[in-house]
Structure formats: C-alpha cells, structure tokens
Image (cartoon, rainbow, N blue to C red):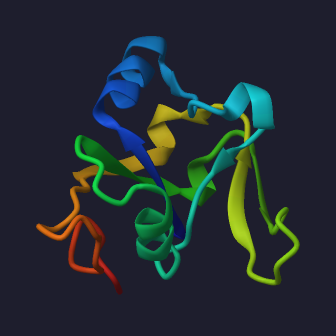
Amino acid sequence: MTTIYHITTERQWHDAKRQGQYEAAFFRSEGFIHCSDANQVVRVANHLFRNMQGLILLHIETELLHPRLVYENLEGGSELFPHVYGPINLDAIARISSFEPGPDGTFDHSVGIEFA
C-alpha cells in the first residue's frame, strides 16, 4: 500500500472522529486536502508548522481513500504533491502519530514518520 501524510492539530483530529470523516481547515475554500509523500513531509512541516505544538501526523493509505487523489503542483513548480479532493474517510487513516518539533522548533525525519 502507498502511504501519504497530512499534518493537522489534535483538535482537528478530535473533530474528525466526532464527525466520522476528516476535513482539513481549508478544505471548503480550496476544494482539496493538502498531503505529502514521505520525502516531502518534513520539508512541508518546517515551512508551514515551525515552532507549532499539538500537531499530529495522519498516515493515509491511498488504496483505501474514497475521494479522488491527484498528484499535482498548483503553485507553478515541478514537484507533485498529493491532494485529496474530498473529506478523508477515517478507515483510510492507518495510523496517527505525534508530530512535535524538536527543541529548536524544526522537524526532522526521525519524528513521527517511519521511512521504508
């Protein structure tokens, strides 16, 4: 199975469990949920979530997703990122792990992700 990752807050995850599906904060305005491959997630975390606490990492199995998954770059670059076009069904989330920055506020590959 192929795994993609999404960084979120503990609060958003608790809301998702109550609602029966996961919807990212900007899903309604953007129309999709931003995700990353294993080799992208640390870079994304350091760019968008530096020094933030209370984060978790959703490990999403792509074969179990009900909504459409598209690899694309909407910012004009050449690197493709996985985007999920709909709320994520909870049974596609294989694992949830704590995703906290190190003492310097940054993330590294040893935090939250298992690389194959």
Q: Residue at x 59, y 36 (%)?
A: 88
Q: Nearer the viewer, residue 68 or 45?
A: 45
- Horizontal side of 67 relative to 19 (left or right) equals right
Q: Residue furthest top?
A: 18
Where does the image place residue 34, in percent across and percent down from the top left? 64, 52
- Horizontal side of 23 relative to 80 (left or right) equals left
Q: How many marks?
A: 0
Q: Residue at x 85, y 62 (%)?
A: 74
Asked where in the image residue 13 lies, by quadrant, the reply is top left
What is the quadrant of the C terminus in the image? bottom left
Asked where in the image residue 99 lies, by quadrant, the reply is bottom left
Above or below, comparing residue 28 to residue 107 in the picture: above
Q: Nearer the viewer, residue 25 or 69?
A: 25
Above or below, comparing residue 86 to residue 83 in the picture: above
Above or below, comparing residue 42 to residue 26 in the picture: below
- Horizontal side of 34 relative to 8 (left or right) equals right
Q: Residue at x 21, y 78 (%)?
A: 110
Q: Nearer the viewer, residue 12 or 89?
A: 12
Where does the image place residue 8, in percent across and percent down from the top left? 41, 42
Asked where in the image residue 115 lies, by quadrant, the reply is bottom left
Where does the image place residue 40, in percent across and percent down from the top left? 52, 76
Where does the image place residue 48, in percent across and percent down from the top left? 49, 58
